[in-house]
Image (cartoon, rainbow, N blue to C red):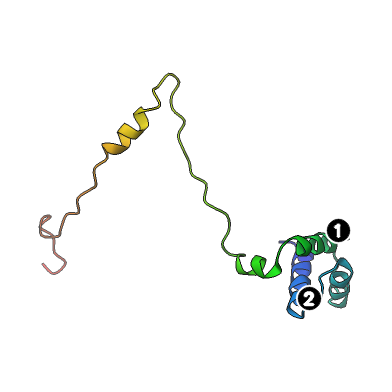
Amino acid sequence: MAASELACSYATMILHDDGIAVTAEKINALVKAANVAVDSYWPSLFAKLAEKRSIDDLIMNSGSGGAAAVAVAAPAAGAPAAAAPAAEEKKEEPQEESDEENMFSLFD
């Protein structure tokens, strides 16, 4: 994250924490008070985000990330689509082998 994005993020959280409406002008004022150079479009982007989304929700869900992508293999050309479920049914659960079956012990 660039310094200008980080400065605007902190300014947005400070304004929200103090119960002050998050506007581009107020974000700019905080950033200038901190002597951070910010591109002119960042404060307005953060202000628009604060209008559309709840800052509390953004803070609480910041580490959750998105859903994991699921990789699915495409069926081969001309292969029947019903073959995939049959292959899943044939999978057997691996049996765990105990140390006694392998004739292995840590203390021998």
Q: Amino acid at mark 2?
A: Leu
Q: Quadrant of residue 21?
A: bottom right
Label whose residue precedes the other's in the sequence (2 or 1) = 2
Residue 46 on image: x %, y %: 79, 63
Residue 48 on image: x %, y %: 80, 60
Q: Mark 2 to mark 1: distance in Å?
A: 18 Å
**95 sits left or right of 23 in the view:** left
Q: Quadrant of residue 89?
A: top left
What secondary structure is found at the residue carrying circle 2? helix
What secondary structure is found at the residue carrying circle 1? helix
**7 sits left or right of 101 in the view:** right
Residue 92 on image: x %, y %: 24, 42
Is the residue 42 above or below the residue 81 in the image? below
Residue in the image at 16% along x and 67% along y? 106
Residue in the image at 78% along x and 69% along y? 7
For disc 2, the marked residue is 15
Q: Mark 2 or 1, which is nearer the eye?
A: 2
Q: Nearer the viewer, residue 18 or 74?
A: 18
Residue at the far bottom in the pictured view? 18
Residue in the image at 19% along x and 50% along y? 95
Q: Quadrant of residue 37?
A: bottom right
Q: Nearer the viewer, residue 40 or 75?
A: 75
Question: Is there a contact, CB below 8 Å, between mark 2 and mark 1?
Answer: no
For disc 1, the marked residue is 41
Q: Amino acid at mark 1?
A: Tyr
Q: On the rendered image, what quadrant is the C terminus found in?
A: bottom left
